[in-house]
Amino acid sequence: MDESALISAAQKGDLDSFNTLVLTYQHQVYNLAYRIMGDGASASDATQEAFISAWRHIGGFRGGSCKSWLLRIVTNACYDELRRIKRRPSSSLESLYVEDPTPDAELPPSQLESPEAFTQRRELNRAIQAGIEQLPPDQRIVLVLSDVQGMSYEEIAEATGANLGTVKSRLSRARARLRDLLLEHGELLPVGYRLQNEGV
Amino acid sequence: MARGLRRANEHERVRALLSTYLDGRASQAERALVERHLKSCANCERNLASLRATVAAVRTMPHVRAPRSFALPRSMAKQPRSTPWLYPLLRTATAFAAFLFVLVVAGDLYTRFTLFSTFAPMAAPAALPPTLIAMQAAATSAQESAPQTTAPEASRTLEQPPPAPAPQAAAPLAPVTTASGARQAAATPAPATTAVTALDLAAVPGTEAPSAAAKAVPPETPVEPPTEQPMGASGLGGGAAGVGQAPGIAAVAPTRALAGQANEAVTPQPTSTPLAAPTEVARVLAPQPPTAPERGGAHQIQRPVVNPLRIAEGTLAIAVVMLGMAAWIARRRNR
C-alpha cells in the first residue's frame, strides 16, 4: 500500500494504516527530536506527542510530503517540550539522575574505523551535541533541520513558520555560534577531520 | 577613511553571507561579492573554512534510531478526533456567558442607582453617593444587628462625660445618640452597623420611621414624621431626628449629615456636633422589646439583599468559570 493510500485509510480511522506510517518515519522523527532536545527521555516524549498529535489531526492533512508534515509536527512538539523544560527546570535536573541510554554511545565502531578514530568521532559528536544544546531554541531547530536533517531552506521555512530571510540569518548565526563554541573548547575540528571534510 | 569604512561594512556583510554561500544559495551578486572579498581577506577565508568544517562535522553525526516503537496503542483508535468544533463552541459559550454576566451586573447597578435616587432628592441630594455606598456595604447587617449593637454603644456613652452641652436645656435626642454612636464607630469595630442604621433611618426622611430605629424606641413613644422638623446640614439628620423625637423632649437637629459621619467612621475625627447628655441615649436605646411595627416603606428599602439579579449574577459567574475550564480542557485535547 503506498503512502497516500495509507493516509486516506488513516483519515477514515484506520489505526493500523497510521501505525504503518509511524513505523516508517519514527526513526527520522526521533532523530530530529533527539538532536533538538539532546536527551533520550525528552526526545521520546516529543516523538510520542508528535505521533499522537498527527493521529488527531490527520483529518487536516491536505496532501504533500507526509515526512515533512511529521517533521513539522515533531518540531512543534520539541518547541513545546523546550518551553515546558524552561518553565520547570526541575524536570531537566531530574533527568540527570536517570540513566538515559545515549544513542551515540551505543553506535558500534565501523569495520573501517580504527579505535582511535572511533573515540575521536564519538568525542566530536558529543561536543557538537553539547554545542547545539547551548544554542537558543530558534537557532537550534533551524540548524538541526538543515544540517542534521538535510532539509532545504524552503522546507525549514515551512516547518518553522518563518520566512526565508529569517531562516537564512538564524542558520548563519547558529553555525557561527556552534563553530565558536567548538573552537572555544578546543575539542573540535581536529586537523585530520577538518582536512578530510574540506577535501570533499 | 571612507574607504576603510566601506571595507568594514563589506566585511560584515560577507561574514553574514558565508553560511548561505556555503550552501550554494547566495544570489549571483552576493556570490560575486563574497568571492571578491575572500581574495583579499584572509580572516574571512579562515572563517569560511572553519564554518565549512563545522557544517561537515554536524552532517556526519550519526542518525539515531528510535529506541522503541512509537506505534499508537489500539485504545487510541477511539480517540475523539472528530470534535475539533468543541473548543470553538465552548469558547463562544464562555464569551457569551461573560457578556451576559457583565450585562446583568450593569443592569443591577443601574437599577440600584435609580431606585435610591428616587428617594434621595426628597432628603439630601448632595449626600446621596455616600449614602448609597454605605447602605450597599452593610445592607445585610443593618436590619438584624443594629438594635443589639447600638445598645451597648449607648451604654458606653453613658459612662463618659458629655462632650458638649446640649444646645437646649431639654433632654437629649435619639438622632444625636445615633450620631454619637457613629462617631464611636471609629474606635470600635462593631459600630459600622450603627452608622448604617443611622443612614437607613435617614434615607427615608419623608416616610415613616425605619424598623431598626422603631425597635429601639419605647413603645409609648409616638413616632412622628420628620418633615416638620428643621433640617440640619442635610436632610438625613432631620430624618433621623424625627425618629427619636419623644413628647416633651425638644428636638435638636444634628448639624452634620449622618451620611458624612458614616463615611468618617473609618477614621476617628473630632466633630463639632453638639452632643446630648448620654443618659437619655441609654434610656432611648436601652434593650427593650421592640414592639413598634415595621412599616412597608422602610421594609422595602432595608431588604435589597433578596435580589433575583444577585442570583443571576452568581449563576452566570459560575457558568463563566465552568465553561472557561471546559474550553481550556477541550483545547488541550485538540492539540
Image: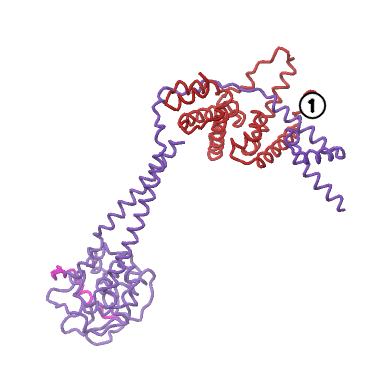
Chain colours: A red, B purple
Q: Which residue lies under the disc numbered 1?
A: A198
Q: Is residue A11 left or right of residue B10?
A: left
> What SS does tag 1 mark?
helix
What x and y, as percent, mark residue B214? 18, 72
Q: Which residue is at a point 30% across and 78% down the rendered structure image?
A: B124
Image position of B199 with respect to B13: above or below: below
Q: Is residue A21 left or right of residue B141?
A: right
Q: Chain of mark 1?
A: A
What x and y, as percent, mark residue B215? 17, 70
The crowding category of the residue bearing disc 1, from other C-alpha atoms within 10 Å (few below 14, some 14 to 19, many at least 20), is few
Tell me the magenta residue range. Answer: B274-295
What x and y, as percent, mark residue A101? 58, 22
Which image quadrant is residue B193 in?
bottom left
Residue B32 in view in this figure: yes
Q: Nearer the viewer, residue B150 or B315?
A: B315
Q: Quadrant of the C terminus of chain A?
A: top right
